[in-house]
Image: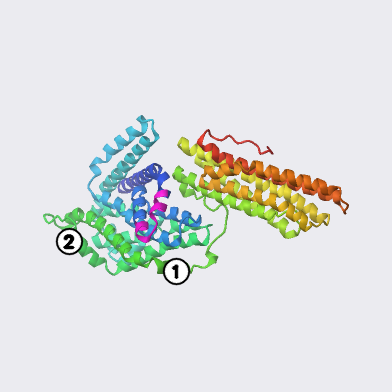
Protein backbone atom coordinates (compact mmCIF):
# COMPACT_ATOMS: atom_id res chain seq x y z
CA UNK A 1 0.00 0.00 0.00
CA UNK A 2 2.84 2.39 0.83
CA UNK A 3 4.64 1.68 -2.46
CA UNK A 4 1.49 2.00 -4.57
CA UNK A 5 0.45 5.21 -2.83
CA UNK A 6 3.94 6.69 -3.11
CA UNK A 7 4.41 5.81 -6.79
CA UNK A 8 0.87 6.87 -7.69
CA UNK A 9 1.28 10.18 -5.90
CA UNK A 10 4.68 10.69 -7.53
CA UNK A 11 3.18 9.93 -10.96
CA UNK A 12 0.42 12.51 -10.46
CA UNK A 13 2.94 15.01 -9.10
CA UNK A 14 5.24 14.60 -12.13
CA UNK A 15 2.34 14.60 -14.60
CA UNK A 16 0.88 17.70 -13.00
CA UNK A 17 4.24 19.46 -13.09
CA UNK A 18 4.68 18.61 -16.77
CA UNK A 19 1.15 19.70 -17.66
CA UNK A 20 1.42 22.97 -15.77
CA UNK A 21 4.84 23.72 -17.28
CA UNK A 22 3.68 22.90 -20.82
CA UNK A 23 0.62 25.13 -20.40
CA UNK A 24 2.71 28.00 -19.06
CA UNK A 25 5.19 27.65 -21.91
CA UNK A 26 2.37 27.57 -24.45
CA UNK A 27 0.85 30.76 -23.01
CA UNK A 28 4.14 32.62 -22.67
CA UNK A 29 6.26 30.83 -25.28
CA UNK A 30 5.92 33.39 -28.03
CA UNK A 31 7.28 36.22 -25.87
CA UNK A 32 10.08 34.41 -24.04
CA UNK A 33 12.69 34.95 -26.73
CA UNK A 34 11.88 38.66 -27.03
CA UNK A 35 11.91 39.08 -23.25
CA UNK A 36 15.30 37.43 -22.87
CA UNK A 37 16.87 39.40 -25.72
CA UNK A 38 15.34 42.71 -24.67
CA UNK A 39 16.49 42.53 -21.07
CA UNK A 40 19.88 40.87 -21.52
CA UNK A 41 21.66 44.18 -22.07
CA UNK A 42 23.90 43.87 -18.98
CA UNK A 43 24.62 41.28 -16.32
CA UNK A 44 22.00 42.56 -13.88
CA UNK A 45 19.08 42.87 -16.29
CA UNK A 46 20.12 39.52 -17.79
CA UNK A 47 19.82 37.90 -14.35
CA UNK A 48 16.43 39.52 -13.83
CA UNK A 49 15.21 38.33 -17.23
CA UNK A 50 16.40 34.80 -16.49
CA UNK A 51 14.59 34.81 -13.15
CA UNK A 52 11.41 36.24 -14.68
CA UNK A 53 11.20 33.82 -17.60
CA UNK A 54 11.99 30.83 -15.39
CA UNK A 55 9.37 31.87 -12.84
CA UNK A 56 6.84 31.81 -15.69
CA UNK A 57 7.79 28.51 -17.32
CA UNK A 58 8.96 26.90 -14.05
CA UNK A 59 12.01 25.20 -15.52
CA UNK A 60 15.57 26.49 -15.31
CA UNK A 61 16.55 23.67 -17.69
CA UNK A 62 14.22 25.02 -20.40
CA UNK A 63 15.59 28.54 -19.89
CA UNK A 64 19.13 27.22 -20.22
CA UNK A 65 18.22 25.28 -23.37
CA UNK A 66 16.71 28.49 -24.80
CA UNK A 67 19.92 30.36 -24.02
CA UNK A 68 22.07 27.65 -25.61
CA UNK A 69 20.00 28.00 -28.76
CA UNK A 70 20.28 31.80 -28.79
CA UNK A 71 24.04 31.69 -28.28
CA UNK A 72 24.54 29.10 -31.01
CA UNK A 73 22.45 31.25 -33.37
CA UNK A 74 24.55 34.31 -32.63
CA UNK A 75 21.57 36.14 -31.09
CA UNK A 76 23.27 36.42 -27.71
CA UNK A 77 26.85 36.60 -26.47
CA UNK A 78 28.36 34.19 -23.96
CA UNK A 79 28.63 37.00 -21.38
CA UNK A 80 24.92 37.82 -21.74
CA UNK A 81 24.01 34.16 -21.31
CA UNK A 82 25.85 33.91 -17.99
CA UNK A 83 23.56 36.44 -16.28
CA UNK A 84 20.41 34.74 -17.62
CA UNK A 85 21.57 31.29 -16.51
CA UNK A 86 22.33 32.63 -13.05
CA UNK A 87 18.92 34.25 -12.78
CA UNK A 88 17.18 31.06 -13.90
CA UNK A 89 18.02 29.38 -10.60
CA UNK A 90 16.23 32.14 -8.70
CA UNK A 91 13.13 31.69 -10.86
CA UNK A 92 12.75 28.05 -9.86
CA UNK A 93 12.39 28.99 -6.20
CA UNK A 94 8.81 30.15 -6.86
CA UNK A 95 7.66 26.54 -7.16
CA UNK A 96 9.21 25.61 -3.83
CA UNK A 97 7.54 28.56 -2.12
CA UNK A 98 4.12 27.60 -3.51
CA UNK A 99 4.52 23.96 -2.52
CA UNK A 100 5.63 24.87 1.00
CA UNK A 101 2.22 26.36 1.73
CA UNK A 102 -0.33 23.87 3.03
CA UNK A 103 -2.54 24.06 -0.04
CA UNK A 104 -3.24 20.38 -0.66
CA UNK A 105 -6.83 20.76 0.55
CA UNK A 106 -7.52 22.91 -2.54
CA UNK A 107 -6.07 20.33 -4.93
CA UNK A 108 -9.32 18.86 -6.23
CA UNK A 109 -10.91 22.30 -6.51
CA UNK A 110 -8.10 23.34 -8.86
CA UNK A 111 -8.41 20.09 -10.80
CA UNK A 112 -12.16 20.59 -11.22
CA UNK A 113 -11.88 24.24 -12.26
CA UNK A 114 -9.02 23.51 -14.63
CA UNK A 115 -10.85 20.59 -16.20
CA UNK A 116 -13.94 22.73 -16.65
CA UNK A 117 -11.99 25.44 -18.46
CA UNK A 118 -10.26 22.90 -20.69
CA UNK A 119 -13.42 21.18 -21.86
CA UNK A 120 -15.99 23.96 -21.90
CA UNK A 121 -14.03 26.84 -23.41
CA UNK A 122 -13.27 27.10 -27.12
CA UNK A 123 -10.49 29.68 -26.95
CA UNK A 124 -7.06 28.08 -26.96
CA UNK A 125 -5.65 30.54 -24.43
CA UNK A 126 -8.43 29.87 -21.90
CA UNK A 127 -7.97 26.12 -22.40
CA UNK A 128 -4.27 26.50 -21.64
CA UNK A 129 -5.05 28.41 -18.45
CA UNK A 130 -7.34 25.52 -17.54
CA UNK A 131 -4.53 23.04 -18.21
CA UNK A 132 -2.26 25.14 -16.00
CA UNK A 133 -4.76 25.11 -13.10
CA UNK A 134 -5.44 21.40 -13.53
CA UNK A 135 -1.69 20.69 -13.55
CA UNK A 136 -1.25 22.72 -10.37
CA UNK A 137 -4.12 20.82 -8.77
CA UNK A 138 -2.55 17.49 -9.75
CA UNK A 139 0.73 18.61 -8.18
CA UNK A 140 -1.02 19.30 -4.88
CA UNK A 141 -3.11 16.12 -5.10
CA UNK A 142 0.01 14.05 -5.79
CA UNK A 143 1.68 15.66 -2.78
CA UNK A 144 -1.31 14.76 -0.65
CA UNK A 145 -1.19 11.12 -1.79
CA UNK A 146 2.54 10.88 -1.16
CA UNK A 147 2.11 12.45 2.25
CA UNK A 148 -0.62 10.00 3.21
CA UNK A 149 1.29 7.02 1.80
CA UNK A 150 4.54 7.80 3.60
CA UNK A 151 3.08 8.54 7.03
CA UNK A 152 3.42 4.84 8.17
CA UNK A 153 7.15 5.05 7.37
CA UNK A 154 7.67 7.05 10.56
CA UNK A 155 7.94 3.72 12.36
CA UNK A 156 9.82 1.82 9.61
CA UNK A 157 13.44 1.57 10.80
CA UNK A 158 15.18 0.95 7.40
CA UNK A 159 13.56 4.11 6.02
CA UNK A 160 14.50 6.04 9.12
CA UNK A 161 18.10 4.85 8.69
CA UNK A 162 18.07 5.93 5.04
CA UNK A 163 16.87 9.39 6.02
CA UNK A 164 19.54 9.54 8.69
CA UNK A 165 22.18 9.02 6.00
CA UNK A 166 20.96 12.25 4.42
CA UNK A 167 22.51 14.09 7.35
CA UNK A 168 25.81 13.63 5.55
CA UNK A 169 25.86 16.68 3.20
CA UNK A 170 27.90 14.92 0.53
CA UNK A 171 25.51 11.96 0.27
CA UNK A 172 22.51 14.28 0.29
CA UNK A 173 23.92 16.47 -2.49
CA UNK A 174 24.80 13.43 -4.61
CA UNK A 175 21.36 11.92 -3.98
CA UNK A 176 19.57 15.13 -4.94
CA UNK A 177 21.71 15.51 -8.06
CA UNK A 178 21.12 11.91 -9.18
CA UNK A 179 17.35 12.09 -8.69
CA UNK A 180 17.14 15.41 -10.54
CA UNK A 181 19.17 14.03 -13.45
CA UNK A 182 16.57 11.26 -13.76
CA UNK A 183 13.39 13.38 -13.48
CA UNK A 184 14.93 16.33 -15.41
CA UNK A 185 13.56 18.96 -13.03
CA UNK A 186 15.05 20.53 -9.92
CA UNK A 187 11.58 21.84 -9.04
CA UNK A 188 10.26 18.27 -8.84
CA UNK A 189 13.12 17.20 -6.56
CA UNK A 190 12.64 20.22 -4.30
CA UNK A 191 8.89 19.59 -4.15
CA UNK A 192 9.39 15.97 -3.08
CA UNK A 193 11.94 17.03 -0.45
CA UNK A 194 9.39 19.47 0.97
CA UNK A 195 6.71 16.75 1.01
CA UNK A 196 8.99 14.36 2.93
CA UNK A 197 9.99 17.12 5.32
CA UNK A 198 6.29 17.70 5.98
CA UNK A 199 6.17 14.17 7.40
CA UNK A 200 9.10 14.88 9.68
CA UNK A 201 11.43 12.56 7.75
CA UNK A 202 14.00 15.14 6.67
CA UNK A 203 15.80 17.67 8.80
CA UNK A 204 16.39 21.21 7.58
CA UNK A 205 20.11 20.55 7.07
CA UNK A 206 19.40 17.43 4.97
CA UNK A 207 16.74 19.30 2.99
CA UNK A 208 19.19 22.11 2.18
CA UNK A 209 21.80 19.60 0.99
CA UNK A 210 19.26 17.76 -1.18
CA UNK A 211 18.12 21.00 -2.84
CA UNK A 212 21.74 21.99 -3.47
CA UNK A 213 22.11 18.66 -5.22
CA UNK A 214 18.92 19.35 -7.18
CA UNK A 215 20.56 22.48 -8.63
CA UNK A 216 23.59 20.47 -9.71
CA UNK A 217 21.45 17.68 -11.19
CA UNK A 218 20.17 19.82 -14.07
CA UNK A 219 23.58 19.56 -15.75
CA UNK A 220 22.61 16.78 -18.15
CA UNK A 221 19.76 18.71 -19.79
CA UNK A 222 22.02 21.68 -20.51
CA UNK A 223 24.84 19.60 -21.97
CA UNK A 224 22.50 17.46 -24.07
CA UNK A 225 21.04 20.66 -25.52
CA UNK A 226 24.55 21.73 -26.57
CA UNK A 227 25.42 18.53 -28.42
CA UNK A 228 25.81 19.20 -32.11
CA UNK A 229 26.01 22.95 -31.56
CA UNK A 230 28.89 25.39 -32.17
CA UNK A 231 31.60 25.72 -29.57
CA UNK A 232 30.04 28.82 -28.02
CA UNK A 233 26.82 26.88 -27.35
CA UNK A 234 28.77 24.19 -25.50
CA UNK A 235 30.36 26.98 -23.47
CA UNK A 236 26.94 28.39 -22.55
CA UNK A 237 25.86 24.95 -21.32
CA UNK A 238 29.11 24.68 -19.37
CA UNK A 239 28.26 27.98 -17.64
CA UNK A 240 25.12 26.34 -16.26
CA UNK A 241 27.10 23.37 -14.93
CA UNK A 242 30.01 25.35 -13.51
CA UNK A 243 27.77 27.93 -11.82
CA UNK A 244 25.64 25.31 -10.07
CA UNK A 245 28.62 23.21 -9.02
CA UNK A 246 30.47 26.25 -7.66
CA UNK A 247 27.28 27.36 -5.90
CA UNK A 248 26.97 23.99 -4.18
CA UNK A 249 30.65 24.02 -3.16
CA UNK A 250 30.27 27.48 -1.62
CA UNK A 251 27.45 26.31 0.64
CA UNK A 252 28.46 22.74 1.44
CA UNK A 253 30.47 23.90 4.43
CA UNK A 254 27.92 26.53 5.45
CA UNK A 255 24.78 24.39 5.58
CA UNK A 256 24.61 24.62 9.38
CA UNK A 257 24.96 28.40 9.35
CA UNK A 258 22.37 28.74 6.59
CA UNK A 259 19.98 26.54 8.60
CA UNK A 260 20.40 28.80 11.64
CA UNK A 261 19.64 31.90 9.57
CA UNK A 262 16.59 30.30 7.99
CA UNK A 263 15.20 29.22 11.37
CA UNK A 264 15.41 32.84 12.51
CA UNK A 265 13.49 34.23 9.52
CA UNK A 266 10.90 31.45 9.07
CA UNK A 267 7.62 30.93 10.97
CA UNK A 268 7.99 28.75 14.07
CA UNK A 269 5.63 26.41 15.91
CA UNK A 270 6.91 26.44 19.51
CA UNK A 271 3.68 24.88 20.80
CA UNK A 272 4.70 21.60 19.08
CA UNK A 273 7.54 19.24 19.90
CA UNK A 274 9.65 16.53 18.26
CA UNK A 275 8.66 15.18 14.86
CA UNK A 276 5.41 17.18 14.86
CA UNK A 277 7.30 20.46 15.14
CA UNK A 278 9.81 19.33 12.54
CA UNK A 279 6.98 18.48 10.15
CA UNK A 280 5.28 21.83 10.74
CA UNK A 281 8.34 24.08 10.40
CA UNK A 282 10.72 22.36 7.99
CA UNK A 283 8.80 22.70 4.67
CA UNK A 284 8.72 26.49 4.88
CA UNK A 285 12.32 26.58 6.11
CA UNK A 286 13.55 24.47 3.18
CA UNK A 287 11.70 26.68 0.71
CA UNK A 288 13.21 29.79 2.28
CA UNK A 289 16.69 28.25 2.30
CA UNK A 290 16.26 27.31 -1.37
CA UNK A 291 15.40 30.91 -2.22
CA UNK A 292 18.11 32.37 0.01
CA UNK A 293 21.07 30.38 -1.29
CA UNK A 294 20.06 30.82 -4.92
CA UNK A 295 19.68 34.58 -4.54
CA UNK A 296 22.95 34.72 -2.60
CA UNK A 297 24.76 32.75 -5.32
CA UNK A 298 23.60 35.19 -7.97
CA UNK A 299 24.54 38.18 -5.82
CA UNK A 300 28.02 36.67 -5.32
CA UNK A 301 28.84 35.37 -8.80
CA UNK A 302 27.21 38.16 -10.83
CA UNK A 303 30.37 40.22 -10.26
CA UNK A 304 32.54 37.53 -11.83
CA UNK A 305 30.78 37.02 -15.17
CA UNK A 306 33.88 38.28 -17.03
CA UNK A 307 36.37 35.86 -15.40
CA UNK A 308 33.81 33.07 -15.64
CA UNK A 309 33.39 33.72 -19.37
CA UNK A 310 37.19 33.61 -19.81
CA UNK A 311 37.36 30.35 -17.85
CA UNK A 312 34.60 28.75 -19.90
CA UNK A 313 36.08 30.01 -23.18
CA UNK A 314 39.06 27.74 -22.58
CA UNK A 315 36.91 24.71 -23.40
CA UNK A 316 38.71 23.17 -26.38
CA UNK A 317 37.16 22.98 -29.82
CA UNK A 318 37.18 19.16 -29.66
CA UNK A 319 34.11 19.26 -27.40
CA UNK A 320 32.07 21.00 -30.09
CA UNK A 321 30.46 18.29 -32.18
CA UNK A 322 29.44 19.56 -35.61
CA UNK A 323 26.21 18.11 -36.93
CA UNK A 324 23.21 19.24 -38.93
CA UNK A 325 20.60 20.50 -38.32
CA UNK A 326 21.87 22.81 -35.61
CA UNK A 327 18.77 24.15 -33.82
CA UNK A 328 16.01 21.54 -33.98
CA UNK A 329 16.03 20.22 -30.41
CA UNK A 330 13.24 17.85 -29.40
CA UNK A 331 12.87 19.68 -26.07
CA UNK A 332 11.12 22.56 -27.89
CA UNK A 333 8.43 20.33 -29.38
CA UNK A 334 6.45 20.56 -26.15
CA UNK A 335 6.18 24.32 -26.72
CA UNK A 336 4.94 24.81 -30.31
CA UNK A 337 5.62 28.57 -30.37
CA UNK A 338 9.26 27.97 -29.45
CA UNK A 339 9.53 25.01 -31.84
CA UNK A 340 8.34 27.20 -34.71
CA UNK A 341 10.95 29.76 -33.73
CA UNK A 342 13.62 27.04 -33.86
CA UNK A 343 12.52 26.23 -37.40
CA UNK A 344 12.95 29.91 -38.25
CA UNK A 345 16.49 29.79 -36.84
CA UNK A 346 17.22 26.61 -38.79
CA UNK A 347 15.93 28.35 -41.91
CA UNK A 348 18.71 30.90 -41.39
CA UNK A 349 21.18 28.03 -41.16
CA UNK A 350 19.76 26.46 -44.34
CA UNK A 351 19.94 29.80 -46.15
CA UNK A 352 23.56 30.22 -45.08
CA UNK A 353 24.44 26.80 -46.47
CA UNK A 354 22.72 27.65 -49.76
CA UNK A 355 24.70 30.91 -50.03
CA UNK A 356 27.96 29.09 -49.24
CA UNK A 357 27.20 26.50 -51.93
CA UNK A 358 26.33 29.22 -54.42
CA UNK A 359 29.59 31.04 -53.65
CA UNK A 360 31.44 27.99 -54.98
CA UNK A 361 29.90 28.57 -58.41
CA UNK A 362 31.84 31.65 -59.52
CA UNK A 363 31.12 30.74 -63.12
CA UNK A 364 32.22 30.14 -65.71
CA UNK A 365 35.03 28.26 -63.97
CA UNK A 366 37.72 26.09 -65.43
CA UNK A 367 36.03 23.18 -63.66
CA UNK A 368 38.77 22.52 -61.12
CA UNK A 369 38.08 19.57 -58.84
CA UNK A 370 37.87 21.69 -55.67
CA UNK A 371 34.89 23.58 -57.12
CA UNK A 372 33.06 20.36 -57.90
CA UNK A 373 33.73 19.02 -54.39
CA UNK A 374 32.46 22.22 -52.76
CA UNK A 375 29.29 22.18 -54.84
CA UNK A 376 28.59 18.50 -54.13
CA UNK A 377 29.25 18.75 -50.39
CA UNK A 378 27.29 21.97 -50.12
CA UNK A 379 24.27 20.47 -51.85
CA UNK A 380 24.42 17.43 -49.56
CA UNK A 381 24.45 19.70 -46.49
CA UNK A 382 21.51 21.68 -47.83
CA UNK A 383 19.59 18.47 -48.45
CA UNK A 384 20.32 17.12 -44.96
CA UNK A 385 19.17 20.29 -43.21
CA UNK A 386 16.10 20.54 -45.45
CA UNK A 387 14.97 17.02 -44.55
CA UNK A 388 15.59 17.79 -40.87
CA UNK A 389 13.37 20.88 -41.11
CA UNK A 390 10.57 18.98 -42.85
CA UNK A 391 10.60 16.17 -40.28
CA UNK A 392 10.69 18.62 -37.37
CA UNK A 393 7.85 20.67 -38.87
CA UNK A 394 5.82 17.48 -39.32
CA UNK A 395 6.09 16.77 -35.60
CA UNK A 396 5.15 20.36 -34.72
CA UNK A 397 2.07 20.22 -36.93
CA UNK A 398 0.98 17.02 -35.16
CA UNK A 399 0.52 19.12 -32.01
CA UNK A 400 -2.26 21.62 -31.30
CA UNK A 401 -0.75 24.60 -33.10
CA UNK A 402 -2.49 28.03 -33.13
CA UNK A 403 -3.52 29.32 -36.60
CA UNK A 404 -0.88 32.05 -36.73
CA UNK A 405 1.98 29.63 -35.99
CA UNK A 406 0.50 27.13 -38.47
CA UNK A 407 0.48 29.76 -41.21
CA UNK A 408 4.02 30.84 -40.34
CA UNK A 409 5.29 27.25 -40.32
CA UNK A 410 3.63 26.47 -43.66
CA UNK A 411 5.29 29.56 -45.14
CA UNK A 412 8.69 28.45 -43.87
CA UNK A 413 8.14 24.96 -45.30
CA UNK A 414 7.43 26.54 -48.67
CA UNK A 415 10.60 28.62 -48.37
CA UNK A 416 12.58 25.50 -47.36
CA UNK A 417 11.33 23.71 -50.47
CA UNK A 418 12.61 26.53 -52.67
CA UNK A 419 15.95 26.81 -50.83
CA UNK A 420 16.46 23.08 -51.25
CA UNK A 421 15.59 23.45 -54.94
CA UNK A 422 18.28 26.14 -55.22
CA UNK A 423 20.82 23.69 -53.78
CA UNK A 424 19.64 21.04 -56.22
CA UNK A 425 19.85 23.50 -59.13
CA UNK A 426 23.39 24.44 -58.17
CA UNK A 427 24.41 20.79 -58.05
CA UNK A 428 22.58 19.63 -61.18
CA UNK A 429 22.70 22.67 -63.51
CA UNK A 430 25.82 24.58 -62.47
CA UNK A 431 27.67 21.46 -61.33
CA UNK A 432 27.03 19.79 -64.67
CA UNK A 433 28.42 22.82 -66.51
CA UNK A 434 31.52 22.79 -64.31
CA UNK A 435 32.10 19.08 -65.00
CA UNK A 436 31.67 19.56 -68.75
CA UNK A 437 33.99 22.57 -68.64
CA UNK A 438 36.58 20.34 -67.01
CA UNK A 439 36.03 17.37 -69.30
CA UNK A 440 36.33 19.45 -72.47
CA UNK A 441 39.42 21.23 -71.18
CA UNK A 442 37.91 24.68 -71.63
CA UNK A 443 39.25 27.82 -69.98
CA UNK A 444 37.33 31.02 -69.32
CA UNK A 445 38.97 34.26 -70.34
CA UNK A 446 39.12 37.29 -68.09
CA UNK A 447 36.59 38.98 -70.39
CA UNK A 448 34.16 36.10 -69.92
CA UNK A 449 34.61 36.17 -66.15
CA UNK A 450 33.94 39.90 -65.98
CA UNK A 451 30.84 39.51 -68.16
CA UNK A 452 29.31 36.97 -65.80
CA UNK A 453 30.46 38.72 -62.60
CA UNK A 454 27.59 41.22 -62.49
CA UNK A 455 24.78 38.69 -62.97
CA UNK A 456 26.39 36.22 -60.59
CA UNK A 457 26.74 38.86 -57.87
CA UNK A 458 23.14 40.04 -58.30
CA UNK A 459 21.80 36.49 -58.00
CA UNK A 460 24.05 35.78 -55.02
CA UNK A 461 22.75 38.92 -53.30
CA UNK A 462 19.14 37.88 -54.03
CA UNK A 463 19.68 34.44 -52.50
CA UNK A 464 21.36 35.92 -49.44
CA UNK A 465 18.61 38.51 -48.89
CA UNK A 466 15.87 35.92 -49.42
CA UNK A 467 17.43 33.75 -46.70
CA UNK A 468 17.65 36.80 -44.42
CA UNK A 469 13.99 37.64 -45.07
CA UNK A 470 12.92 34.16 -43.94
CA UNK A 471 15.14 34.08 -40.86
CA UNK A 472 14.12 37.55 -39.70
CA UNK A 473 10.53 37.43 -40.98
CA UNK A 474 11.31 40.73 -42.71
CA UNK A 475 8.77 41.59 -45.40
CA UNK A 476 10.71 44.67 -46.50
CA UNK A 477 13.73 42.54 -47.35
CA UNK A 478 11.44 40.05 -49.11
CA UNK A 479 9.98 42.82 -51.26
CA UNK A 480 13.51 44.00 -52.05
CA UNK A 481 14.29 40.55 -53.51
CA UNK A 482 11.06 40.49 -55.52
CA UNK A 483 11.73 43.95 -56.93
CA UNK A 484 15.15 42.83 -58.20
CA UNK A 485 13.39 40.94 -61.03
CA UNK A 486 13.58 43.70 -63.63
CA UNK A 487 17.24 44.48 -63.01
CA UNK A 488 18.31 40.83 -63.11
CA UNK A 489 16.29 40.20 -66.26
CA UNK A 490 18.00 43.16 -67.91
CA UNK A 491 21.43 41.86 -66.87
CA UNK A 492 20.61 38.41 -68.26
CA UNK A 493 19.32 39.86 -71.54
CA UNK A 494 22.39 42.05 -71.96
CA UNK A 495 24.71 39.13 -71.24
CA UNK A 496 22.83 36.89 -73.68
CA UNK A 497 23.17 39.53 -76.41
CA UNK A 498 26.90 39.94 -75.82
CA UNK A 499 27.46 36.18 -75.86
CA UNK A 500 25.51 35.99 -79.14
CA UNK A 501 27.78 38.65 -80.62
CA UNK A 502 30.86 36.71 -79.57
CA UNK A 503 29.51 33.54 -81.16
CA UNK A 504 30.36 34.96 -84.61
CA UNK A 505 33.99 35.48 -83.64
CA UNK A 506 36.60 32.98 -84.60
CA UNK A 507 37.90 30.77 -81.86
CA UNK A 508 38.34 27.16 -80.78
CA UNK A 509 35.26 25.34 -79.41
CA UNK A 510 33.19 28.51 -79.82
CA UNK A 511 29.88 26.59 -80.13
CA UNK A 512 30.62 24.39 -77.10
CA UNK A 513 31.57 27.41 -75.01
CA UNK A 514 28.43 29.29 -76.05
CA UNK A 515 26.21 26.32 -75.13
CA UNK A 516 27.78 26.01 -71.67
CA UNK A 517 27.62 29.76 -71.11
CA UNK A 518 23.90 29.79 -71.93
CA UNK A 519 23.38 26.85 -69.56
CA UNK A 520 25.02 28.96 -66.86
CA UNK A 521 22.68 31.88 -67.52
CA UNK A 522 19.66 29.58 -67.44
CA UNK A 523 20.85 28.09 -64.14
CA UNK A 524 21.43 31.52 -62.59
CA UNK A 525 18.00 32.74 -63.67
CA UNK A 526 16.35 29.64 -62.24
CA UNK A 527 18.19 30.23 -58.95
CA UNK A 528 16.98 33.84 -58.85
CA UNK A 529 13.36 32.88 -59.47
CA UNK A 530 13.58 30.28 -56.70
CA UNK A 531 15.01 32.99 -54.42
CA UNK A 532 12.09 35.20 -55.43
CA UNK A 533 9.68 32.42 -54.45
CA UNK A 534 11.43 32.17 -51.08
CA UNK A 535 10.91 35.90 -50.60
CA UNK A 536 7.30 35.63 -51.71
CA UNK A 537 6.53 33.14 -48.91
CA UNK A 538 7.55 35.87 -46.46
CA UNK A 539 5.71 38.66 -48.26
CA UNK A 540 2.55 36.53 -48.36
CA UNK A 541 2.53 36.03 -44.58
CA UNK A 542 0.48 39.20 -44.24
CA UNK A 543 -2.17 37.80 -46.59
CA UNK A 544 -3.09 34.14 -47.08
CA UNK A 545 -1.20 30.96 -46.13
CA UNK A 546 1.29 30.02 -48.80
CA UNK A 547 0.50 27.01 -50.99
CA UNK A 548 3.76 25.60 -52.29
CA UNK A 549 4.16 24.22 -55.79
CA UNK A 550 7.02 22.59 -57.67
CA UNK A 551 9.67 25.14 -58.56
CA UNK A 552 9.80 26.32 -62.15
CA UNK A 553 11.34 29.22 -64.00
CA UNK A 554 8.84 32.08 -64.09
* Residue occupying image coordinates x 39% and y 56%: 40
Residue corresponding to mark 1: 310
Local secondary structure at mark 1? helix
Query: In this rendering, does residue 528 appear at all?
Result: yes
Q: Which numbered mark, 1 or 2, is in the foreground of this view?
A: 1
**Relative to 265, 108 lies left or right:** right
**Quadrant of the frame with the C terminus:** top right
Residue corresponding to mark 2: 264
Q: Looking at this view, is 553 or 64 the one in front? A: 553
Number of numbered discs overlaid on the protein picture = 2
Q: Residues within 10 Å of mark 2 (few under 14, many from 20)?
A: few
Residue 28 figure quarter: top left
Q: Is residue 234 magenta?
A: no
Local secondary structure at mark 2? helix
Relative to 390, does residue 355 appear above or below in the rendering?
A: below
Residue 182 figure quarter: bottom left
* Residue occupying image coordinates x 78% and y 49%: 517
Q: Position of residue 368 (x, y in %)?
A: 76, 59
Q: Looking at this view, is 115 or 540 the one in front? A: 540
Residue range in magenta is 34-47
The numbered dot on residue 342 is none
**Relative to 338, 136 lies left or right:** left
Q: Position of residue 220 (x, y in %)?
A: 44, 58
Q: Residues within 10 Å of mark 1 (few under 14, many from 20)?
A: few
Q: How is the image coloured?
A: rainbow
Query: In this rendering, does residue 62 appear at all?
Result: no
Amino acid sequence: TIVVGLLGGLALFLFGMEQMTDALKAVAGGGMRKTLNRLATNRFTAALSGAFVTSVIQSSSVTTVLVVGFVSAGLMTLSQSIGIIMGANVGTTITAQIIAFKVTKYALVLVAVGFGLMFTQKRDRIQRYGAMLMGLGLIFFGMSLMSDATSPLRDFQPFIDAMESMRNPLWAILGGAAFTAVVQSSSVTTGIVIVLSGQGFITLEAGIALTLGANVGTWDTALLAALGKPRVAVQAAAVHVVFNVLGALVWVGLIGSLADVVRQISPASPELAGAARLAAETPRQIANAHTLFNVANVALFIWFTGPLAKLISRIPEVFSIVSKPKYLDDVYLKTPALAVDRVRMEMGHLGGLVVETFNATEVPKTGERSTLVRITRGAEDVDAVYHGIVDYARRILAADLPPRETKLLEGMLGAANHLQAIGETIQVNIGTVARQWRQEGLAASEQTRSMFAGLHESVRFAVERAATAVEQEDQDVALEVIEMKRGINEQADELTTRLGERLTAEGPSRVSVYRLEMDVIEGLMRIYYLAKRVAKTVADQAEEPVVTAPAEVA
